[in-house]
Image: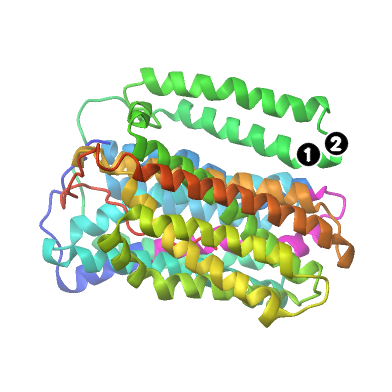
Amino acid sequence: MPDGPQTDEEPATGERLTRTRWSVGLAAFVIGMNVTMMNVAVADLRASFPDARFTTIGWVVSAYTIVFGAVLVPAGRLADRIGRRTVYMAGLAAFATGSVIAGCSPVLWLLVIGRVAQGVGAACLAPSAMALLLDATPARERAAATSFYAGAAALGTASGPSLGALLIDASSWRAAFFLGLPVVLVAYLLGQRSLPRSAPLRGGALPDLLGSVLVMAAVVGVSFGIGQGRPWGWTHPGVVGGFVAAAVLVPLFVQRCRTHPSPVMAVGLFRQRSFAGANGAALMVGTAIGGASLAGVLFLRDVWGYSLVGAGFGALPASLAAIAVARPVGRLGVRFGEVAVGVPGATGIALSVLWYRALVDADANYWLGYFPGNLLMGVGVAAVLPMLATAVVRGLGSDQFSLASATNRTFLQLGNGIGIAAVVAFIGATTGPEALADYRQAWLALGVVALVGAAAVAAIGRAREAEPVAAPSSTSPLPSPAPEPSA
């Protein structure tokens, strides 16, 4: 990704800088919150749409993360091309519009469209928000600003299930969509008065939106095939068609990226083993995290019979643990390297779901059965995600940091969507103790995927000495903050 437009203004100070920080911080909060909030809404959605298949309801959860991941890089390029403030404000408007559509939807397909609009809005917000914050912040304060942004995103992710559960329990799933509206409105009003304006880039190609459509369609094909494989049968024409469509679209997408002047992904960077390994690991780890997050809440609710609020708060320790260990884990990464910390992190995610597979049964035992695995998940997420964000830019020039970081986030989000589809396929609509066997199959599959992710992280290390390590540049417009926990 190019260095991007330079701000026409000096860094902000005082009240204006405070307003800018709160605007982008609120945007980061609402993005993170919507990654996890819908996990607790599934039971209420089932009640509202009793005739809908469970696999169809699963798209309400996964549509947001799939679209978010696919549109992220083009949105960042568009922000550089036409102005970060413009894209940021448009992202807030798109997110608010999607929230209203989803919250008012009388039918399920319109609800999914609302989630798609939310995903587009989040993809516009994520890269432009961080760039605007750094534009407005004096150089000596940028590290603190980045930490503030990452903390706001982590807080949103951590609070999503519990806030969502409280609202849904008091009202319905519709209230969960309206929760973000006042947050977005405040972010918009603060941003109008404070965000710096940047000079758009002149010339150059527009971002490849068709490439985004191709990668979205490919992931939807895979997710559809996985999700419908169990209820329809793996040889059903629709299931086979989903996988075939993905197999056709992926090469088309790669070719598109090779020939387009402003591609969704810089496929040439995959010749770097660290880049390829970090993105492969992000896809695998993202699959495990996305699937485990949904499975955990559903298990507490549907098998152990927890209340909606109980299930929402029951999943909270993972996010709190991730926040608590983020700083010391970062120090370990600096001292010992990405592989030394990332491999145990990915392995911790695998051990978390395998703990459930081996030790959790139909009799509720939260503190000895569920809590240790949930805690281990949070620590694993905090250990592996920042290491992948660091490893993906190893050996690259500072002008490539932004694109590499956004690509890594894309693989992580697409993995989340695939993991959600896999869990929906494994557990189906069965509830109660008889569903335990289905959950155990899902946990086993997610554990294997996470171990593959750990192997991908380990493979990064074998290329370390052969690659120069590029020093981060403070002028790169979209440096990657520590990824917010997704557990």
What range is drawn magenta here? 25-54
* Residue situated in front as seen by the camera: 104 or 170: 170
Residue 169 lies in what quarter of the image? bottom right
- Name the amino acid type tagged 2: Trp
Q: Are marks 2 and 1 in contact (CB under 8 Å)?
A: yes
Front one among 222 and 281: 281
Q: How are the residues colored?
A: rainbow
Residue at numbered disc 2: 232
Q: Is residue 81 above or below residue 12?
A: above
Q: Is residue 389 visible?
A: yes
Residue 317 sits above or below residue 24 on the image: below
Task: Write down the residue under mark 1.
Answer: 228
Residue 335: percent from left, percent from top: 26, 63
Task: Name the residue at 21% across, 44% down.
Answer: 469
Residue type pointed to by label 1: Gln
In the structure shown, which secondary structural element does the residue marked by tag 1 occupy?
A: helix
* Left or right position of 390 against 137: right
